[in-house]
Image (cartoon, helix red, strand yellow):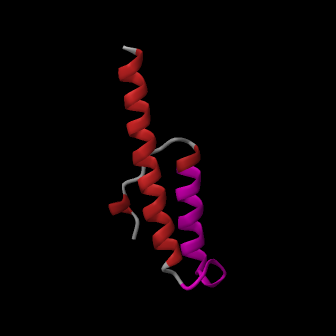
């Protein structure tokens, strides 16, 4: 049972890593954080806060 739990945890961590990589690519494709609008900065802040609370974010929800 512990092995199954470990595999599930690893699976979730891999999903999180993939989401972070995709998010980083989206951020890298922007002109730069210093050139983001106020609304874009707020969106990044809300994404970071949600991730810190452990809320899963679908990449399709990110514009």
Q: In terms of depth relative to the viewer, which is nearer, 16 or 56?
A: 16
Say if 5 sits above or below 48 in the image.
above
Front residue (pair 19, 37): 19
Up the image or down, 31 lies above or below 54; here it is below
Q: Does 45 sit left or right of 13 as displayed? A: right
Residue 4 falls in which quadrant of the image?
top left
Magenta part of the protein: which range? Answer: 31-50
> Residue lying furthest left in this view?
60
Position of residue 25 measured from the top left corner of the image (x, y, whole percent): 47, 70
Dominant secondary structure of the residues highlighted in magenta in the image = helix
Q: Quadrant of the C terminus?
A: bottom left
Answer whether residue 38 is magenta in the image. yes
Work out whether 25 lies above or below 60.
below
Count the labels in the image.
Answer: 0
Residue 39 is situated, as x and y percent measured from the top left of the image, at 55, 74
Seen at 40% across and 23% down, the residue is: 5
Give the position of the N terminus as an image quadrant. Answer: top left
Say which residue appears at 62% left-offset and 85% top-offset.
35
Q: Position of residue 47 (x, y in %)?
A: 52, 57
Q: In the image, what residue occupies the spot 38% across and 29% down?
A: 7
């Amino acid at each position: 049972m512990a092995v199954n739990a470990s595999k599930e945890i690893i699976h979730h961590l891999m999903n999180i890593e993939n989401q972070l990589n995709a998010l980083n690519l989206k951020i890298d494709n922007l002109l730069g954080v210093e050139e983001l609008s106020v609304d874009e900065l707020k969106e990044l802040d809300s994404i970071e806060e949600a991730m810190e609370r452990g809320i899963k974010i679908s990449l399709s929800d990110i514009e």
